[in-house]
């Protein structure tokens, strides 16, 4: 602990999703071979969708186009605007020569294929289930996630069993803003009927998760994945080595 938190007095605990509750196992992603190199990625399923709809592209070209789109959208990203996945893929396909109608239709399909492949590789570690079970007995719970497709996020949550285990879910694409913008967490607090000072937010990203907690005025438990300590001046109330460290940090007995 690096600042004085409320410990056992919290009425709500809200979690980040990826890297906090859910991990993605890269070994569950498809194998892509290009240019003599073999990698695990979603590229094979994306190229399959493109081929089925008459678009001939390579994995390298597709990711180069996506990088160009990311650069184009840098200003919006800096303002924490959430750009839907389907929009990025549509713009990437347009850069690769697809006409507007094809780029729009296939962009949606490619986006869904990409996100479905990621969802298939996602899992909740057993130790994380134990944390959620204990927290759920003591406080209301929620998930606030930076994710660029709301339907895919809910499908993932349903598949891994989290959707029915928390009291509320807020996805950035649904509200149009990404953490650390305060809107996603404010929406969750409203749904929980809680004030910021009665909640602790838990996440692994210093910028997004510590930032969003500070933006709404709540305490934060930050998972220090690299063990290097906070990279900025803001000191979280709790610095954890991993998610199971949340329980002793809050003073909650198993």
Image (spheres, grey):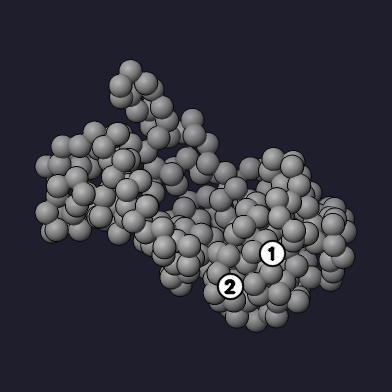
Mark 2–mark 1 CB contact (< 8 Å) = no
Q: Position of residue 15 (x, y in %)?
A: 64, 60
Return the disc, 2 or 1, that comes first in the chain's sequence: 2
Q: Nearer the viewer, residue 77 or 244?
A: 77
What residue sits 42% from the left and 30% below the top?
Answer: 40
What residue sits 53% from the left and 41% below the top?
Answer: 24
Which mark identifies residue 201? 1
Residue 242 in view here: no
Q: Which residue is mark 2?
A: 182
Q: Nearer the viewer, mark 2 or mark 1?
A: 2
Left or right side of 195 for 112: left
Q: Label 2, label 1: how many angstroms apart (C-alpha)?
A: 12 Å
SS for dot 2: loop
What residue sits 71% from the left and 74% below the top?
Answer: 217
Q: Position of residue 244 (x, y in %)?
A: 75, 48
What residue sits 38% from the left and 62% below the top?
Answer: 83
Q: Quadrant of residue 246?
A: bottom right
Which of the image's four quarters has the N terminus? bottom right
Q: Nearer the viewer, residue 22 or 60?
A: 60
Q: Position of residue 54 (x, y in %)?
A: 11, 42
Residue 84 in view here: yes
Crowdedness near tag 2: few (<14), some (14–19) or many (≥20) residues, C-alpha within 10 Å:
some
Crowdedness near tag 1: few (<14), some (14–19) or many (≥20) residues, C-alpha within 10 Å:
many
Q: Measured along the vertical axis of the image, is residue 216 above or below residue 25?
A: below
């Amino acid at each position: 602990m690096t600042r004085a938190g409320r410990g056992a007095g919290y009425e709500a605990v809200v979690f980040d999703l990826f890297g906090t509750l859910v991990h993605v196992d890269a070994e569950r992603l498809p194998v892509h071979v290009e240019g003599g190199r073999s990698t695990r990625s979603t590229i094979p399923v994306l190229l399959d969708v493109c081929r089925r709809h008459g678009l001939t592209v390579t994995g390298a070209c597709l990711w180069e186009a996506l990088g160009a789109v990311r650069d184009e959208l840098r200003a919006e990203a800096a303002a924490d605007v959430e750009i839907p996945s389907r929009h990025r893929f549509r713009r990437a396909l347009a850069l690769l020569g697809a006409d507007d109608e094809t780029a729009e239709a296939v962009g949606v399909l490619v986006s869904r294929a990409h996100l479905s492949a990621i969802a298939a590789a996602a899992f909740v570690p057993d130790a994380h289930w134990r944390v959620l079970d204990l927290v759920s007995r003591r406080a209301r719970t929620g998930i606030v996630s930076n994710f660029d497709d709301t339907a895919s996020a809910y499908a993932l949550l349903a598949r891994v069993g989290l959707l029915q285990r928390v009291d509320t879910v807020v996805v950035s694409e649904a509200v149009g803003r990404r953490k650390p913008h305060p809107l996603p967490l404010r929406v969750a607090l409203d749904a929980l009927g809680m004030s910021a000072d009665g909640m602790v937010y838990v996440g692994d990203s210093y910028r997004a998760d510590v930032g969003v907690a500070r933006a709404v005025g709540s305490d934060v438990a930050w998972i220090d994945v690299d063990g290097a300590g906070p990279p900025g001046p803001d000191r979280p109330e709790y610095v954890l080595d991993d998610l199971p460290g949340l329980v002793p940090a809050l003073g909650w007995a198993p």
